[in-house]
Amino acid sequence: MSEKRPEEDPEEEMHTRPAESFQPEEQERAGPPVREQMGDGRSGPGEAAGLLRDHGRYALGILVLLLALSWLTFDGGHPDLVLVLFVAFLAVTYRMVATSARLSHRARENLVFAALGGGLVTILGIISGWSNQFLVFTMTNVLIYAIFALGLNLEFGYTGIINFGHVAFMAIGAYTFAIFSTSMLDRIGLLMEPTITAGVVVVVLAAVAFLIVGVLVSILAERVMARSAHRVTASTHRQVTVFTGSVSGGAAAILVVLVVPFPMDAMWAQTMVVGAGVVLGMVLAAVAGVLLGLPTLRLRADYLAIVTIGAAEILRRAIRNEQWLTGGPQGIPQLPLPFPRASEQWEWLQHLSGALGIRSPWVLLLFLLVLVALGLVLATYTVLLRSPYGRVLRAIREDEDVAAALGKNVFAYKLQALAIGSAVAALAGGLLAWYRPFISPQTYEPIITFYAWIIIVVGGVGNNKGTVLGAFILFSFIEITRVLNLDENLGLSGPQGSALRVSLIGMLLILVMLFKPEGLLGRREELVLGD
Amino acid sequence: MLFLDVLPADVLLQGLGDEAARFGRFVVNGLVVGSILALAGVGLTLVYGILRIANFAHGDFLTLGAYLTLYLTALVTLPRTLAWAVAVALVLVAFVAGDRFLRPWVRDRLQRSRGQVTADRRLARRWFSPRESRLLLFAALALIVLVAGVRFPISLPGGLSLLFVAVVACAPLVLEALRTGRGPQPTRTLGVWAGIGLLAGLAAHFLVPLQTGPGGWSQPAEIALALGVFAAGLLNSQRELVRRTLPVLGFAAGFVVLLYLFADLRILALAVSLAVVSAVMVLLELLMWRRARRQGAGLLTLIIIAIGLMLLLRNVIIIIWGTRQQVFPGTLLPRVPILGSDVGITPYQSLVVVVTLVAILAMHLFLRYTKVGKAMRALADDMDLARVSGIDVDRVVVYVWILAGALAALAGTLYAFTRPFDTNLGWFQVLPIFAAVILGGIGSPYGAMLGGFTIGLVMEVSPYFGVPVDYKLVMAFAALILVMVFRPKGLMGGGAAR
């Protein structure tokens, strides 16, 4: 697809042909190279105008498509047509933005993101009759899965670790949160009659656990480096101290929260417990990641894939069978949530949700919480990946041997990436448990891992923006087909309807891998999949 | 076969007491599951070793095979007598057509190529040496004993029926040998042979009171009988190409038809299912795998494509057949004691073991003695070297997919014979299959067979030692990790383990 140039300017093609011989690679990736150079580094309103000029036909097409979509949905019926139009919309938007020669890679990324994201929100709005409640609820789901896939993106997109058991870490996060917070709240009677001291006790417990485990993790990492066959360089040591420092810093932060004497009423106490549960889940998931990685990270890529897929499956069966801990197949109902009485007590929340026409303030609050969590993850990633640390990870992805030859302890870095990615997955697990709010083994089927894979592959491997966009596209597709009752209209019922959805997703994965392996936002020269 | 009556095995097993019998039951389950893993593993290991595709969709081809067989079985039901008529007609047509068209064609080809002894012909002539076919016959006879012993309790009617079956299977051979004094002559007595085969089948079917129950699979003894006739045919067909081709064809046809009848069309359904799954695999090769290979797709790309295929295939199966649990008629028949001991086996289970042994034998012959089989092993060993020696890789790869598809469908169907199943059949098996393949060494078919039986036994016997039934997979997984960490090349040291 990308190898084709825009069809509407054949003359341009003629002019730029001589340039091809000098820059064949760039030519393959984007439009005419001369323009590429001109557009590089520039961004501004002029670009968008130029884009519209170049692709007026496409823009018009999008407009017509959107109009047709809204007409079809208001008319009722025709869900299949709506789906076809939806796909056409994606293709046309992408074609319009991504192949434009005027833009730098960065600007193109942003534009694709904005265009597809905005368009999808519009479509979701149209099909739901502009119900903000539905939109916010769906967005929450999208963002949670975006966080989940971001964990995988760090592992695979940046470090090149192939992990098909990602859902296991989500399960660890969710179950740790659920078991920890329910048992804690039960034990001190907080759920019934919360007191400030009880809350303090719980949070102290959580922080202590966090500290102990965090220090253990850093010591473990330190040990692994010390015993490694490679000579540990000063820079590696610096990395280790940064890593352990950040862990203990996180623990210290919790302690500070404790020391600050804000009025801890029942609501805050429960929030603290619940938050501590999620954090503990993240820590445990990181530990689990290290435990899984220690014997397996040295294996070949395909072996690692099999081992991780097996580990996730075993964990799921263990969850289903260990009734005493996890509640067995029924799972754990009625999980405690953060800010339990915010809907009644916080006026700003009521005002805001009232203004947006959202009936349940909790939906909005959860959306905001998830947004904050996503922001935190993205900020951490930015700091982490733009530092020397991130460059080492990418070096490992490109060529392990070179990274090792430069004195980097490849194994330790991979272990850390797996630990961080697992912790992020656990965060998503905790948030998803808030979202439902119950957990059961059915939530953690292997398909969830594959969702994450599809998200990062479609969005562009090794691109965080692309990951968020991928989550957007995947769940828009799922929601749109669900809302439009596509399956029932095709005469399929229940499981067969969702099977249709998943089979289309599987086909999408195959097609993307065959025809556009760099995804929507990835760079072909950074492609990890081709090696 | 009378010696079965005095064989001390039953005494021996009973003497060991309940504990041994209990253990024996687990071992039987292990053998059954191991058979399935071995069959599926051979296909996967070839694909994995030659194409470097860690094909996670392989399990779902098992599911597809099982569902297709079930569907086709339910689709076609003929009245018994009509089925017999069809069978006889088919055999007659096969023989007449063979005599009319095939023999002259083979003769012409032979005359044309006479004088220049090609490697092809040498290979063809050595398909089975006399010694090998004698071994084959013995193997078939051993199978008769095994199947019959496994299947029927040793009682007076049982013993008599065994005797009958054995005599029917062997008598023509012996008589012929006695008459001519130098081993049976195939060409003249071809029709007689086919007739004897059919008559024997008929007789066994109608005269011997061995029905297993309502709607049950009819006698494995008859299958064994057919196998014996088949082996006899092979033994007879030693001399030249003309004399070899026709009897083999004839007996193969007779064999298939016999089985087809005895199985209430299940064999026909199975054959179609094998063909369809193979065709699907070849289609996928042409549509995507070849393209991916040309693009120089790496290990990871191929794995992700395989995952996509897995999602697609499984959900298409769900769309077509739903998620309801399915069961073949006859699966839930009671276990029958082996040799009078307390260790029982269901008719289908014994079928699984027998068919697997036959299939493994056929695989062995295929890989050792045919050109394509040799090419496959060469590719699995060293792709570049094979290519340099003039092997047409793309062509051989198509054969690899055909083989993998047929074996996957067979394994899936056999698995579905032994227990109720749903669309998760393949997913639950794919990890043990991978364990078997890696245990045996990627790219090594023999390793996959060994690994399959090992993993199957480990999984199914572990509950005997107190492992909860739901954690069988953990055992397979633990074995896998141990192998990966300590011997990543597998037991047989597959050449493709790079």
Image (cartoon, coloured by chain):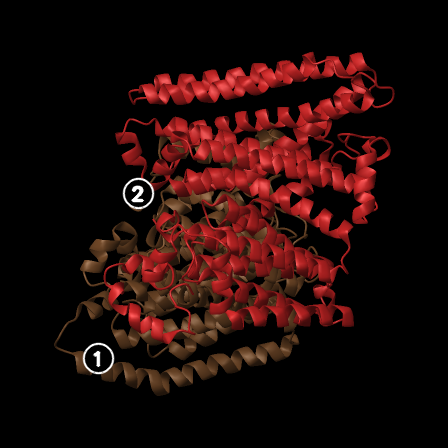
Chain colours: A red, B brown
Asked if residue A408 is positioned above or below residue B275 in the image, the reply reads: above
Which numbered dot is residue A509? none
Rendering coords of residue B56 (x, y %):
48, 50
At numbered mark 1, what does the secondary structure look like: helix, strand or loop? helix
Name the residue nearer the viewer: A183 or A322: A183
Identify the residue at image location x=36%, y=74%. Answer: B247
Give how far across and how far down residue B221 sits, in percent: 54, 59
Identify the amino acid type marked 2.
Answer: Arg
Q: Is residue A91 above or below residue B89?
A: above
CA gap, disc 1 and disc 2: 44 Å
User: Chain under label 1?
Assistant: B
On the image, the x and y values in percent for residue B279 come to: 46, 68
Depth order, front residue of A303/A215: A215
Q: Amino acid at mark 1?
A: Leu
Please give left or right for residue A104 compared with residue A125 in the image.
Answer: left
Q: Secondary structure at mark 2?
A: loop
B50 and B298: which one is in front?
B298
Q: Decide if residue B349 is in sight here.
A: no
Residue under circle 2?
B498
Which quadrant is the N terminus of chain A positioned in?
bottom left
Q: In the rendered structure, the residue with mark 2 lies on which chain?
A: B
* Image disc number at residue B110: 1
Q: Is residue B16 above or below residue B202?
A: above
Q: Left or right? Give the position of B89 relative to B238.
A: right
| Nearest the eye: A454 or B81 | A454
Q: Which residue is at a point 52% across and 15% down the rendered structure image?
A: A215
